[in-house]
Amino acid sequence: MKAKHMNKKKRQILKKSVASVMLLNMLCMSAVMPVMAAASDSGQVLTAAATTTKTPAKAVSIPSVDSLGLDVRSAVLMEASTGQILLSVDADKAMPPASMTKMMTEYIVAEQVKQGKFGWDDVVTVKKNAAKSIGSRIFLAEGDQHTVKDLYIAMAVGSANDATVALAEYVAGSEAEFVKMMNEEAKRMGMKDTHFINSTGLDRADMPAEFRPAEDKETVMSALDAAILCRYIVRDHPDYKDFTTIQSYKFRPNDKAPIINYNWMLEANKNITNFKSYAYEGLDGMKTGHTSNAGNNFTGTAERNGMRLISVVMGTDSESARFRETKKVLDYGFDNFEVKQAVAGKTKVKGWETVPLKKGKETTVPVVTDNAVSFVVPKGTQDLNVTFKASVTEADKLVAPIKAGTKVGTVTYTYKAEGMEPQEKTVNLITAEEAEKGGWFRLFFRAIKDFFVDLFDGIKNLF
């Protein structure tokens, strides 16, 4: 009975198969276009991931941070191109940044110029708040007029509080409104342990009384946030060096003495008697800071052999100490790490060389990575063992014609080495070439082929 039942079932399937073929012939003769359209829209959505696993790279021996003997309240070292943290000492602790606050003012002013909202040669009229500012200053009087560029140099080089306030008021109408912009930018940049109350970094009690914020708060910033801010400056405004490397600047023609740059570590100072012992190869920024509450702070950045590092030290006990401690931090980075490319741009990913394509001249299209991938590695590392995870999530949208460079997914590369935190970098998977739309004749006979393949696969599975 069972055998007879099976034979009966097979006969039914064969009858259906014959009927299907007859139906297909009829469609071929009388309904070519509808069949072609239906067949060309068939296909499956490809959403999947692939991984490879290799043994983690064995790191060249990296000395411990404790071995540096840092005398700071907090410190951090960041590699600028990747954002990788190489050293951290209470780096997320919110502390008074003093004049390192001015880095945000510098960023916003430079951004406004970049966007064309005003120019470096625009003239600023000094208001009461700026004229009343104390601390480091260039003694601006209410009603004085100076260019944006002159005031910017006074702020970046001489850390002038009055010049800083004058710029803040020029940008936003008042310092209070400018501070709102500062805090919004901090949030956008991902600065999680920062709050600004003014444009300068002065303690609230040292601001002119009538211009103090009502809320009894102080400006705070973590070392990590200072590094993040510095990285934005380096990345978005590479011309910062036109200002931060100025060693001295005569603000007014009749000034008896020029403004002297507070940054003793500038490489250009290697020939200056008083500063040459502090001059550091490749250092070209960024900002010092000091108040009695903050101690002596410094955000520095230097580049050697194609690698740029950003260091922050906070709460040192003297002007010279902040530079000595910065040297320890930067030396630690340059002596023990380097940036190496792990994957070149426009690289094929193993197992994901192509993705399906609908209605195309071809049924697949080749894909590659859009950008190169680099990691910070222990100096001297030869073999960068990386793992990857690829995900193609746009396959259901790939209908010819499509342009070269169309995103179809992502691939995340991970690098691990002894003594270092794992590093990840995600890049896009894009189509490597243009995909043309197939002609109706090609698509029609591809549909016939697919129909019979599916049909006979189904029959085969039953026997």
Image (tube, rainbow, N blue to C red):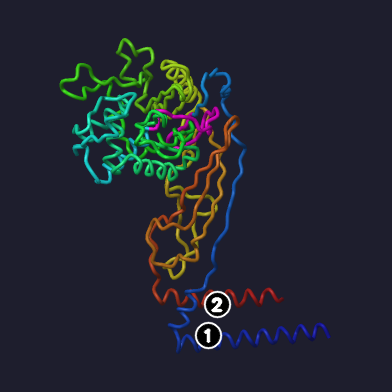
Name which residue type carries label 2.
Phe
Q: Position of residue 347 (x, y in %)?
A: 45, 47
Q: Identify the mark nearer the N-term, 2 or 1.
A: 1
Q: Is residue 113 left or right of residue 77?
A: left
Residue at the spot of label 1: 24
On-image quarter of the N terminus: bottom right
Q: Please state the horizontal and vertical placement of residue 377, each as a whole percent of the image.
A: 51, 32
Q: Residue at the left extreme?
A: 253
For the C terminus, give its image quadrant. Answer: bottom right
Please give the range of residues in magenta: 77-101
- Give percent across and percent down for residue 16: 63, 86
Q: State the mark number for residue 129.
A: none
Residues at marks 2 and 1, CA–CA distance in whole angstroms = 9 Å
Residue under numbered circle 2: 451
Cβ–Cβ under 8 Å for marks 2 and 1: yes
Residue 302 location, quadrant: top left
* Residue drawn where x is 29% and y is 39% of the image: 169
Point out the residue furthest to the right here: 1
Q: Nearer the viewer, residue 160 or 341?
A: 160
- Asked which quadrant contains residue 407, the reply is bottom left
Please report the residue visible at 19 percent of the width from the left and 39 percent of the height from the top.
Answer: 122
Q: Is residue 453 above or below residue 267?
A: below
Residue 242 in sight from this viewpoint: no
